[in-house]
Image (cartoon, rainbow, N blue to C red):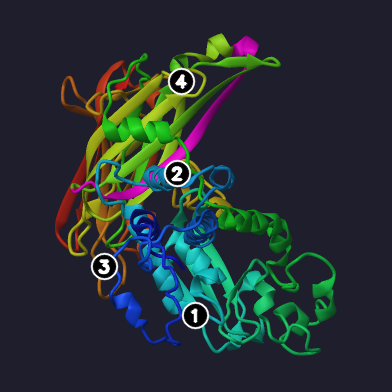
């Protein structure tokens, strides 16, 4: 692997050293005495071999050798250094370059496009990329360089996984129900888990199997490939095969996974295409999108076209003691989007780019996506007063960050909007009572088991999409024909040592802001939400029809009777 291709090229081009073989001096003749008495003459002197003029043939040969050396260095950069991160379009463009100056400029721009902080002289992306290559070579080599292995490929492309389940010796293995259950013996294998991969998805599992038992773990989408007893009759049976409800031979009658029947076997076939699609995403180079937005956002340029307005809301939800989920909700008015009508359908397209950076300008999270809004052409005018929502949940450590967001109207290139604000992510200490953000939403409903933690506006097993206002200090509005939905989580409740349950009072109130009087109040015991947990989720739907138009405030109070702590959250709203 060529880690210093740039410096090698500099030496070759800058110095232009040509090494000319010295003459053979093994056969020396005795000097002619007569030559010692002759007067010095440039024509009569033996020419200095180091100063003689080279022939055109020798010059061409030397230049060809230098070009070949440079060509090899560029080829190494293309086929080794950036093999997993360069796009097909970039690779094709690089191969069509005519000279080395163009190649040097291309390489410089290649890294600049991926630099998370273009204003910094150091390119953190490039440094991290070469660190990953070195790590892959040090840890995943198996008869070939580590960067050529599948584990090396994934490590270079996506970095270290969040967790690794390793079975370096294989051996006895109790299958999970998703793989048919039952016990078998396996080849050495590893399962890498990523909580999130940009452009791929959430909760990604990658499986690598060493079927040759030589240390070369290859990526597989067939979870049965690690089964060393798959083709051994009567051995390594699934639960249903042990009970006589299916036959082992039935495993090999179709599909690329030969897991065998089991309690959840019917789900595997429906997910085969999902696994194929996942593999395609993992082995594709990461896309470079919306670089015009990146430039506008990072350089803080003045916008020349009409401003593209949008609203942003951020919330905080505890995941672990050290990780906080930050849902970012972006609201765009349909009236501000440029629609193009084709075949009777009006379509608007908006590119969204977000970046979270530390106070030292280090990028810790990015997200980019495309929002499409479609309406039948005849209904477009009626839909312009509606709003479109884009929602993204970003995991962060507690601390102070900056959130930058840029959006672009694809059908109007000069229509760009920019947002920037500090982001103070709270820490949830184990001994201190805490809450998530209090979210007022249009709808709250549970999602299916397949959609838990996935999809837009899904937190855990609940779909909750916040209402967003132009100014965070401005209360959200509800019509009297609508329902008021609110959601909040409570953390670190005390647990009774004897009953092993929490003991807290949860009170929610609706307060008239004009008179500061309570117009609705209800109190519940924490056992109604899950008595054996130190965490509970408060969700409630209230009919707004009973409230007169005006300004109100919803307040949720938690009184923990074990830890003797109290905490409350409030959110204003308006009834129209």
Q: Earlier in the sequence, mark 4 or mark 1?
A: 1
**Horizontal and vertical percent for residue 79?**
54, 59
Callout 1 secondary element: strand
Distance, label 2 to label 4, CA atoms, is 25 Å
Q: Mark 2: give few (<14), some (14-19) or many (20+) Cα within 10 Å.
A: some
Callout 2 secondary element: helix
Q: Earlier in the sequence, mark 3 or mark 4?
A: 4
Q: Nearer the viewer, mark 4 or mark 1?
A: 4
Q: Mark 4: give few (<14), some (14-19) or many (20+) Cα within 10 Å.
A: few
What kind of secondary structure does the magenta stretch mostly adopt?
Answer: strand
The residue lying toward the viewer, choosing from 408 and 266, is 408
Distance, label 1 to label 3, CA atoms, is 35 Å
Q: Nearer the viewer, mark 2 or mark 1?
A: 2
Residue bounds of the magenta highlight: 360-379
The residue lying toward the viewer, choosing from 286 and 524, is 286
Distance, label 4 to label 1, CA atoms, is 49 Å
Q: Please tell me which residue is depicted at 31% across the width and 67% down the height of the picture.
A: 501
Q: Nearer the viewer, mark 2 or mark 3?
A: 2
Residue 374 among those drawn in magenta: yes
User: Is 307 above or below relative to 69?
Assistant: above
For mark 1, what is the residue? Answer: 166
For mark 3, what is the residue? Answer: 495
């Amino acid at each position: 692997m060529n880690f210093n291709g740039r410096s090698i090229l500099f030496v070759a081009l800058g110095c232009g050293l040509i090494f000319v073989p010295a003459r053979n001096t093994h056969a020396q003749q005795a000097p002619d005495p007569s030559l010692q008495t002759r007067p010095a003459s440039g024509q009569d002197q033996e020419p200095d071999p180091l100063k003689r003029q080279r022939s055109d043939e020798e010059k061409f040969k030397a230049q060809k050798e230098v070009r070949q050396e440079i060509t090899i260095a560029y080829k190494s950069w293309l086929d080794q250094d950036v093999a997993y991160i360069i796009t097909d379009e970039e690779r094709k463009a690089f191969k069509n370059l005519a000279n080395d100056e163009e190649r040097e400029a291309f390489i410089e721009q290649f890294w600049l496009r991926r630099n998370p902080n273009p204003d910094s002289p150091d390119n953190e992306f490039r440094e991290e990329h070469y660190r990953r290559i070195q790590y892959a070579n040090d840890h995943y080599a198996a008869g070939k360089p580590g960067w050529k292995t599948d584990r090396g490929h994934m490590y270079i492309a996506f970095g270290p996984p969040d967790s690794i389940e390793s079975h370096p010796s294989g051996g006895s293995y109790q299958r999970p129900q998703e793989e048919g259950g039952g016990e078998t013996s396996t080849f050495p294998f590893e399962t890498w888990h990523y909580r999130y991969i940009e452009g791929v998805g959430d909760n990604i599992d990658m499986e690598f199997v060493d079927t040759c038992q030589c240390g070369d773990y290859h990526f597989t989408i067939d979870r049965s490939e690690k089964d060393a007893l798959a083709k051994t009759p009567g051995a390594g049976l699934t639960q249903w095969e042990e009970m006589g409800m299916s036959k082992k031979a039935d495993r090999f009658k179709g599909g690329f996974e030969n897991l065998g029947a089991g309690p959840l076997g019917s789900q595997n076939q429906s997910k085969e295409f999902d696994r194929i699609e996942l593999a395609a995403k993992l082995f594709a180079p990461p896309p470079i999108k919306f670089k015009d937005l990146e430039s506008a956002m990072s350089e803080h340029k003045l916008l020349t076209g009409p401003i593209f307005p949008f609203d942003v809301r951020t919330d905080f939800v505890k995941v672990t003691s050290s990780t906080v989920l930050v849902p970012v909700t972006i609201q765009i008015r349909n009236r501000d989007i440029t629609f193009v009508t084709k075949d009777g359908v009006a379509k608007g397209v908006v590119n969204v780019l977000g970046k979270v950076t530390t106070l030292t300008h280090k990028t810790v999270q990015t997200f980019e996506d495309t929002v499409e809004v479609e309406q039948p052409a005849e209904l477009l005018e009626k839909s312009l007063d509606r709003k479109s929502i884009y929602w993204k949940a970003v995991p962060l450590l507690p601390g102070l960050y900056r959130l930058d967001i840029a959006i672009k109207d694809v059908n109007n290139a000069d229509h760009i909007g920019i947002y920037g604000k500090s982001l103070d992510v709270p820490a949830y200490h184990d001994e201190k009572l805490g809450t998530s953000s209090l979210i007022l939403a249009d709808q709250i409903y549970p999602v299916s088991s397949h959609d838990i933690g996935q999809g837009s506006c899904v937190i855990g097993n609940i779909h909750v999409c916040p209402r967003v206002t132009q100014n965070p200090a401005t209360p959200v509005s509800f019509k009297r024909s609508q329902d008021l939905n609110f959601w909040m989580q409570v953390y670190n409740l005390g647990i009774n040592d004897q009953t092993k349950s929490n003991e807290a009072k949860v009170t929610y109130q609706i307060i008239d802001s004009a008179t500061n009087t309570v117009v609705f109040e209800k109190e519940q015991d924490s056992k109604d939400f899950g008595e054996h947990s130190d965490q509970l989720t408060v969700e409630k739907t209230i009919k707004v029809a009973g409230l007169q138009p005006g300004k109100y405030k919803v307040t949720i109070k938690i009184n923990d009777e074990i830890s003797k702590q109290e905490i409350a959250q409030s959110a204003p709203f308006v009834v129209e």
